[in-house]
Amino acid sequence: MEFLPFVQSHHDLNEAYVGYHVPWLVVLSLTMAILAAFTSLSHTDLIRRTKHVLARRAWHVSGALAMGLGIWSMHFIGMISFRIDVPVYYDTSLTAISVLPAFFAAWITLHVLSKNEQSVKSILIGGLLLGAGIGAMHYTGMAAIETTADMRYQPFYFLLSILVAVVLASLALATRRWLRGYIENQFLELTVASIVMGLAVASMHYVAMHATVFLPGESDPFFEFSGVAPEQLVIGTLFVASFIVVLNTVVVLMQNQTRHLRATVERRGELVQELTKRLRTVAARVPGMVYQLRRDAKGRLHFTYLSEAVNSLFCVTAHEAVEDASEILRQVPESDRIKLFESLEHSAKELEPWQHEFRVVRGDGEQRWLYATAVAQAEPHGVVSWSGFITDVTEKKQSAEMIHRLAYYDALTNLPNRRWVVDELNDRISRCAAQRKCVLVWLINLDNFKRINDVHGQPAGDALLKAVAEALTQLVEKDMVLVRLTADEFLLVHEKSRDEDIDLHARAISAKILNVMSQQFNLPRLRHQGSASVGVATAFDSSVTADELMRRADLAVAHAKRSGGNHWSYYDPSIEVEVSARFQLELDLRAALHQNEFVLFYQLQVSENGQPFGVEALMRWQHPTRGLVSPAEFIPMAEESGLIVPMGAWALEEACRQLAIWQTNDATKHLSVSVNVSARQFYQHDFTEFVLNTIQAAGVPAKLLKLELTETLVLEDLDVVVRKMRALKEAGVRFSMDDFGTGYSSLSYLSTLPFDEVKIDQAFIRRASSLEHERDWTIVEAIIGIARNLGMEVIAEGVETEVQWQRLADSGCLRYQGYLFSKPVSISELPV
């Protein structure tokens, strides 16, 4: 029998047997085709989602087997459904072989459908191969038929069956791709695609059956059929159908499980994405960089995660830093990097939280301070990881440094302040005994600094302090510290070994300080002749605290000031007794001011004929227990404590009050009063107004008040002195230069200052009167001549002998004051 026998021209088709199909078997065949297609197509999702190669191939084989057997079963059920009036049997070998093309066709189908992207070309090629495979399976199966009839194929319908198989196979392969844009339900999409695939297989079968004709053949009553009967084939087909149903159930269950797992994975993936998004959002909003750092077993560091803030902190991208951690680490200075690695090592060893502060120098040269914190976690194989964040603490550190600087440094001079030096001194003192060292301090107090502020204002005082700080800084040696202690005090701290000459070192540094401080400071709008008093104190062990050491230095400064300033003094315990006495004296002075214990004594001033023309008012202190206290004892304390200002004011008021009394008597109304004015009092900003108000309140002529100014006072600030003197002279007040002849620059300024009188100092008169200084009279005579040429009166004080009086008269000095004429006496004893 031929494999593909076609109808020839001599065959009469009218003689062909008329066959028919059993309807329920046709429906069964179609159902089998759809079920096989559904089972096979369900495999495509399993194949696509399976990552393991062997498992994917196993699902491919399983799907191809299910579809191939399903197509084969559909074919033979369709053949069994066909009935003709001749016996039909089936060759078992060809029947079994016919399943191979079906399996091939199913393999091609799954290969095309399991691809994520299906091109038109792949669909057409797959359709061609699938259609060819179905056709090959059908006609191989038909060749297995054994019958007495002559089975032939009509060429047209044969070709049409192949064309239908290819076209419908291509349509079936493209169905799922087209349906995805219209059907969202995956099960419905799969069902529709399976129906199309089943119809494609069934359509080819029944078109091919229409191409088959059975013509009467030669009848042999003794012919025996070797194939199986249709009833036996039904049993095999049912077995295959059962296999497909079971396999379909398994596949559906697997698919449902896969779908459930996929949905779970998708939900978890979405949740992970959402959490990741949130974490990235949080990481982006955290004030700093979130990171994960890992150290492998060989100690190598690398980042596994970095937030985008890495760009603002290190000027590198997260990708660059993950690829190469040195992109970040190289920005850490070597000294900081060593400490950073040490702290990481400690954290890894103890598995303790890591906290570290370090610097980075970025590519643009900017230095920033960063603070890192992380939680350490041990991982397998000796790996340690840290998860945490890094923040920029530059501004915080700068603020802390600023707060520290404000607390421990002087804003004007940038020198450490008292709070800082107390800690420093206590630290040095605590170590000096063990190290056999001595801690020395030099307390430097600016002489007459307050007067600079009072007269020229705070800007001038600040300028002087800055200039002094710069000058003293030049003296600072190794291990020395210069501190601004108070408004007008600086402190120099040093340590020396006890084996060295401590006293010699103290003297040498003190001399350098005085030398530096005695220079002339050129300040804005002011040239200031500097001077300072220096106190030195030492500590050899911790029995002396920082405060006590500075107190001792302060006492030494006070002792130096009592020596006239511009001196230095070593602290000695005997100073304590003196300080205690001076403290008590200051208390008594304050009490005396409030209890009116001060009185004015007056000493006559006479003309050339011995007649009084005025008096000098001299202050005395009538102490309730000590009696009359010498001015030499209390005036320096009054100057030092500032009490000289209210005491001077009282003296001026009292002198004007006495002038007012004398104005009521013709015998005394011509007398003038000379009142000594201290520098501190004169440089008070309201001194001029105070004098004029006092004169006005007393109702006395201003010309009878004479203010005595010392040479030191007028030379301190010539411009201020001239301005105030002229303002008072316009009101009638007269001025006398006191103690003339004791300075070195009086003559150069005498013509500038509007003095009415020059008073030759008594010490000068006394010296010129001695035989060994006979030539000094030439100087006296020169002073008298210069003063008279300048239109000034000359008065000599300290005239105690007739010889002095006569010689002064011969030299042209016609005014005198001294014991020869009158001692300083109370107003009741004054001979006027």
Image: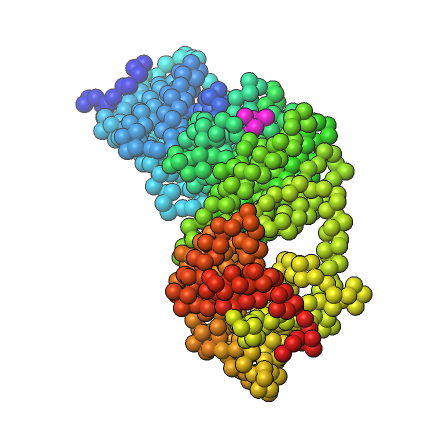
What secondary structure do most residues of the magenta stretch adopt? helix
Front-lying residue, 108 or 595: 595
Front-lying residue, 453 or 307: 453
474 up-or-down from 788: above or below? above
Display colour scheme = rainbow
Residue displayed at 61% across by 43% down: 568
524 up-or-down from 610: above or below? above
Question: Which residue sits furthest left?
Answer: 9
Q: Position of residue 260 (x, y in %)?
A: 55, 39
Q: Position of residue 669 (x, y in %)?
A: 56, 83
Residue displayed at 22% across by 29% down: 156
> For residue 366, what is the image quadrant?
top left
For the question of whether residue 357 can be seen, the reply is: yes
Front-lying residue, 396 or 830: 830
Front-lying residue, 600 or 696: 600
Image-based side of 716 in relation to 215, left or right: right
> For residue 658, what is the image quadrant?
bottom right
Q: Position of residue 815 (x, y in %)?
A: 52, 68
Residue displayed at 21% across by 21% down: 8
Q: Position of residue 184 (x, y in %)?
A: 43, 46
The N terminus, quarter of image: top left
Image-based side of 830 in relation to 464, left or right: right
Q: Which residues are magenta?
A: 338-342
Question: Which residue sits furthest right?
Answer: 625
Q: Is residue 474 magenta?
A: no
378 up-or-down from 315: above or below? above
